[in-house]
Image: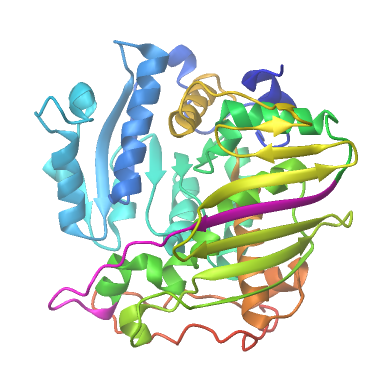
Amino acid sequence: MSSRRTFLKTSAAAGAVVATSGAGLFAAGNETIKVGLIGCGGRGKGAVEDILVAEGKINGKNPKVDVVAVGDVFKHQAEGAVKAFKSENPKSKYFPYRAQIKVTPETTFDGLDAYQKVLNAGVDLVILATPPGFRPTHLEAAVKAGKHVFCEKPVAVDAAGARKVYALEEESKKRNIAIVAGTQRRHQKGYLEAVGKIHAGAIGDVVSARCSWNGQGIWFRDREPGMSDAAYQMNNWYHFLWVCGDHIVEQHVHNLDVINWVMNDRPVSAVGMGGRANRPAGEPAVAGNIWDHYAVEYEYKNGVKLYSYCRHIPGDNDISEAVVGTKGRASLRDGAWTVGGQPGGEDDVRAYVQEHIDLLNSIRAGKPLNELRAVTDSTFTAVLGRNASFACKKLKWDDALKANEDLMPKNLAMDSKIAVAPAPTPGSWRLPPAAG
């Protein structure tokens, strides 16, 4: 059975590089790693818990990770996170780690520039957990500031954002910056073992694949009195294309990432369909403009087809991946992996924690993990499938990535008025011309 450490060394997923200069090495774990949080919603607060738990597993009762700064576009979110982290309630999940919370009022930031203030607050590592539309800008700023990064997936919502993130890979590696993405499964022992067996030929050559994230739905937040368009859309971010990218990008990216990992590649084209049948009704500026179901057929350069499904409609849940080979099949379902009819893997540490263990260990070893290309490939796989579904036409990867597609509002401010187009009608989307 392949170990997680052995597989990470041999898999293209890890992308580790040997450090020679740039970001601090934290040799042998003797220096405290100072962490800043950018984006204080549920996932951001969860990532703080995860990295503190991870450090406990590494260094036990002598932790060398401190959380020193937080930032969010909303003041109440930033202050609420600090309050939660510093809770004196023994039942709080943060209570065992309260001595590692070194955030002060002076290092609690809000506003659209909060990310810049966190980066300037003496941090060594930042957790990027804002809505995905902001990820390219925040990643660029973190890399240029020389900070190690844990970034939530996805890393872009459009072609312009993807191009920006792709361009950061070389610079981040030259500067020995660790970048680990919240795709989790690439750090999960069960998945690592199962995919390792596929790569070793346990089911022969891959001939087709299927992946799904079919779930019930997602939260919706009503507009609060006095909220500007910008504030409302950022607070209700999951429902607006410019800030979320749609659920195929924000959520289904996990499953698409697994198949790209299995294939050691990314698709060359996609064609799909879908629509909006179960979202809240109303004007797009209120109800949002994302779809709630997609079905996409992807093709890889070797001719292998991937059949991808995701929805937010009540019904049976299915969050899984499956691979068919010339000698057998593999079922990649969290907690029940099978490869060629045999058990495919087993778990021990939660993947949410393991990804931070791997991140911290890589920094301290001077061999920072860099997963930026893999997560950007998977992100743009999702964007490609979304746009191909909007168009109801076959869309090639290269054409889609070159397109002058930029969903981010220009000159965004907290009081901005932001017009919202209706959710795309299937077949109405057209590929923009190539960016200049």
Picture quarter containing residue 189? top right
The answer, for residue 20, to whether it is visible in the render is: no
In the displayed structure, does residue 324 sit left or right of residue 128? right
- Give x and y (percent) for residue 137: 46, 60
Q: Residue furthest front?
A: 315
In the image, 243 versus 409, the foreground residue is 243
Q: Which segment did they paint magenta? A: 207-229
In front of the other: 56 or 207: 207
Whether 243 is drawn above or below 132: the answer is below
For residue 278, side relative to residue 341 (left or right): left
* Vertical comparison of 4 with 203: above or below: above
Displayed quadrant of residue 73:
bottom left
- Check residue 227 for magenta coloring: yes
Task: Reply above or below: 269 against 361.
Answer: below
- Residue sitting at 70 percent across and 72 percent down? 400
User: Which quadrant does the N terminus fall into?
Assistant: top right
Q: Position of residue 170 (x, y in %)?
A: 65, 46
